[in-house]
Image (spheres, grey):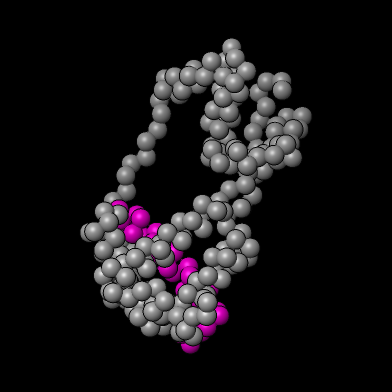
């Protein structure tokens, strides 16, 4: 279906179908998060502004509408300030892509998004486990069984390396290298960045 020239739906489709997964190689979870921002933006435009998705264009999405959308997320949807800022970041990311492909229409949209500041949120203090709490966690798996031993090994591995659960799941045999005095791990982090973790081997493998 062909959209109107000034509609932002065509570049938006290309942005999600090709640019993010192929050019940027973002993870499926990140792309899903970005999609959620635009899906709920369209919902806002339809419910509050009586504008269906096929009528949305760059000109309509001025700084006032964007601010109203973000305020609506907080007041009507109960979103936190952090999530509000994430939605704004998703819009800002798309403006760069859209401007590079349709400067005349999308540059105004970029300027409008850039005028909307992020909200400051109070930072929650970091929580951490005590040594006793860590020992309790490590004792949860039954190490006398194969599955329990596997789970305990994974917990110790994550604790020692600081890796996320998904990063551990993405590891392959080739990502782990053993040397005489240490071991190295190629960690596939967010944005498919490869981070190298190196640890000293304190006991025979």
Image position of 56 with respect to 126: above or below: below
Q: Is residue 121 visible?
A: no
Residue at the (44%, 19%) spot, across then down:
136
Identify which residue, 45 or 187, lies in the foreground.
45
Look at the image and give the residue range highlighted in magenta.
80-106
Q: On the picture, is 104 further left or further right than 22?
A: left
Residue at the (68%, 20%) spot, across then down:
203
Q: Is residue 149 visible?
A: yes
Q: Position of residue 180 (x, y in %)?
A: 77, 29
Image position of 116 with respect to 194: above or below: below
Task: Name the residue at the right extreme.
Answer: 180
Residue at the (55%, 33%) spot, across then down:
158
Task: Name the residue at the top extreme.
Answer: 144
Whether 204 is among the magenta residues is: no
| Total count of labels | 0
Residue at the (61%, 52%) spot, across then down:
193
Q: Quarter of the image holding residue 82?
A: bottom left
Position of the C terminus, as image quadrant, is: top right
Image position of 137 with respect to 86: above or below: above
Identify which residue, 118 or 69, lies in the foreground.
69
Q: Position of residue 152 (x, y in %)?
A: 56, 22
Identify which residue, 177 or 62, lies in the foreground.
62
């Amino acid at each position: 279906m062909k959209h109107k020239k000034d509609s932002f739906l065509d570049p938006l489709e290309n942005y999600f179908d090709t640019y993010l997964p192929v050019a940027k190689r973002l993870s499926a979870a990140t792309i899903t998060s970005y999609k959620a921002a635009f899906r709920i933006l369209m919902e806002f435009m339809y419910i509050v502004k009586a504008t269906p998705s096929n009528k949305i264009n760059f000109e309509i999405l001025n700084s006032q509408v964007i601010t109203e959308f973000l305020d609506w997320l907080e007041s009507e949807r109960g979103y936190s300030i952090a999530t509000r800022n994430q939605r704004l970041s998703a819009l800002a990311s798309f403006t760069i892509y859209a401007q590079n492909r349709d400067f005349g229409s999308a540059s105004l949209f970029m300027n409008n998004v850039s005028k909307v500041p992020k909200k400051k949120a109070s930072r929650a203090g970091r929580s951490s486990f005590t040594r006793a709490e860590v020992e309790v966690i490590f004792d949860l798996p039954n190490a006398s069984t194969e599955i329990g031993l596997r789970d305990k090994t994974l917990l110790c591995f994550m604790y020692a390396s600081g890796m996320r659960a998904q990063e551990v799941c993405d590891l392959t045999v080739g990502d782990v290298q053993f040397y005489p005095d240490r071991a190295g791990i190629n960690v596939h982090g967010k944005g498919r960045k490869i981070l190298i973790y190196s640890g000293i081997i304190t006991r025979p493998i």
